[in-house]
Amino acid sequence: MGLDLRMPIGLMFSVFGVMLAVYGLFSDRAIYARSLGVNINLVWGLVLLVFGAVMLALSVRGSAKMRSRSADQSGVPVARKATGGK
């Protein structure tokens, strides 16, 4: 079973990060008066986006390792097994 939870978690954080960052970029500046002028939506949107990108990168790296490990164990690449060795 090749379920890697880093992929959906990375996608979720990336999507929410983009949404929050875009809201921070295009929202009214007056709402940030309470947070001492800091655009907290933009800052945390970028934090979420970076975290999501790191999770996606780790997922891609992990799946590449898993593919190479399974190819090493059987001697036949995984893609060739699925097609029946043709």
Image (cartoon, rainbow, N blue to C red):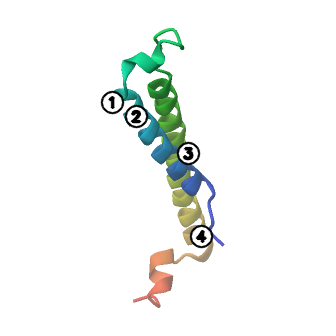
Residue drawn 50% across and 54% down?
60
Location of residue 71 in the rendering, given as x and y in whole percent from the top left corner: 55, 71
Q: Which mark is residue 23?
A: 2
Identified by mark 4, the residue type is Ser
Location of residue 79 in the rendering, given as x and y in whole percent from the top left corner: 45, 77
Identified by mark 2, the residue type is Tyr
Element type at marker 3? helix
Give the mark nearest the N terminus, 2 or 4: 2
Q: Is residue 27 above or below residue 30?
A: below
Residue drawn 50% across and 22% down?
40
Q: Residues within 10 Å of mark 3 (few under 14, many from 20)?
A: many
Identified by mark 3, the residue type is Met
Residue identified by numbered label 1? 26
Give the mark nearest the N terminus, 3 or 2: 2
Residue drawn 37% across and 24% down?
28
Res. 61 in view: no
Residue identified by numbered label 3? 55
Element type at marker 1? helix
Location of residue 45 in the rendering, given as x and y in whole percent from the top left corner: 48, 32
Res. 18 in view: yes
Q: Confirm or deny contact between disc 3 and disc 2 (CB under 8 A).
A: no
Q: Residues within 10 Å of mark 4 (few under 14, many from 20)?
A: few
Element type at marker 4? helix
Q: Is residue 31 above or below residue 57?
A: above
Residue identified by numbered label 4? 70
Q: Is residue 43 left or right of residue 69?
A: left
Give the mark nearest the N terminus, 3 or 1: 1
Q: Residue furthest left?
A: 26
